[in-house]
Amino acid sequence: MDVRDLECFLAVAEEGTISRAAERLHMTQPPLTVRVRALERELGVELLVRHGRGVTVTAAGRLLADHARRLLADLTATTETVRAVGLGTRGRLALAIGHSVAPRLLSRLLRSVGSDVDLALVEVSDAEVLDRVHHREAHAGLLSQSRSSPRRAAGLEVAVVSRAPLVVVLPQAHPCADAERVDLAELPDDRVVVPDIAEFTPTEFTPTGGTRHRAESVSHALALVQAGMGVVLLTTEHVPQVWPGLLARPLRQHTEIVESAVCWRPDEHSPVMRRFLRAALSTPEPDVLGQRFARDRPADS
């Protein structure tokens, strides 16, 4: 039984005349009549009674019309679902997120995913991000890497999606809070360290006689800073997370730019992951310092 024949018959049954059905289907009456008669011959029963005012649907025709509506609706839904899965707008996406990846960056990248995709996010160390993607526990991962980090790791592809400089976060009552730029050499020795960001910090930030507090997450690091346990270096991507009572200040020293990257298996063919990856790799890399933190430029630049 041809799907197009069913569509033609249902249009005639619902419209009550061949002419209105042909107009609805954007076709002429003769081929429409041919299709309906061919369907009747195939089934061996009369589906329509023709008369001067149009057509009347027989008992067999009414039964076929009911089944045809459900069949065609199921076919449309199946077509849309298959297309959505193939285009990556429906399905499941598992992401491993490094502790140092800022929520603002993550939300920016996730806008391309869409509400019909089931998301599974897990926050782990940068090293575990690579391990989870390598062992197919995640479709892709987000992590921080220095300029000296390898662009490939454990057979994975790695590509930069954002670059951000470091800023120091300190309590609002800190003696250096009013400085336009903070000199690391003038800071007290107590430090709060986020391990995945620590490798980017300059030697001036390493405490010589103070205490080094370790926090696996940025939010815990900020809590330690607010509790008076020291100061912490984060990226400008983390500035929106800084809550009242704390301040983010640019540094006087030149520091390494922190690169956030996406990693994935080259043999991972998930359409959802591939769609996410296309969006992530097309994300522009602006001057992430912004006007507030931008460094002074020479007058002739």
Image (cartoon, rainbow, N blue to C red):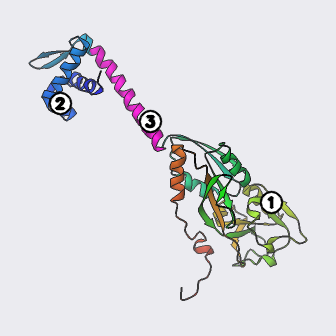
- The residue indicated by pointer 3 is 82
Task: Measuring from the top left, give residue 166's x and y in whole percent.
Answer: 69, 69
Give the structural element (helix, strand or loop) at label 1. helix
Residue at image point 37% right, 31% down:
76
Image quadrant holding the N terminus, namely top left
Residue at image point 69% right, 67% down:
148
- The residue indicated by pointer 2 is 22
Q: Earlier in the sequence, mark 3 or mark 1?
A: 3
**Given the current orientation, which residue lies at the most extreme right position?**
209
Amino acid carrying label 2: it is Ala
Task: Measuring from the top left, give residue 32's x and y in whole percent.
Answer: 17, 27
Q: Nearer the viewer, mark 2 or mark 3?
A: 3
Q: Earlier in the sequence, mark 2 or mark 1?
A: 2
Q: Is 170 in the magenta? A: no
The local crowd at label 2, few if under 14, some if 14 to 19, many if 20 or more residues have their Cα within 10 Å, is many
Magenta stretch in the rendered image? 62-88
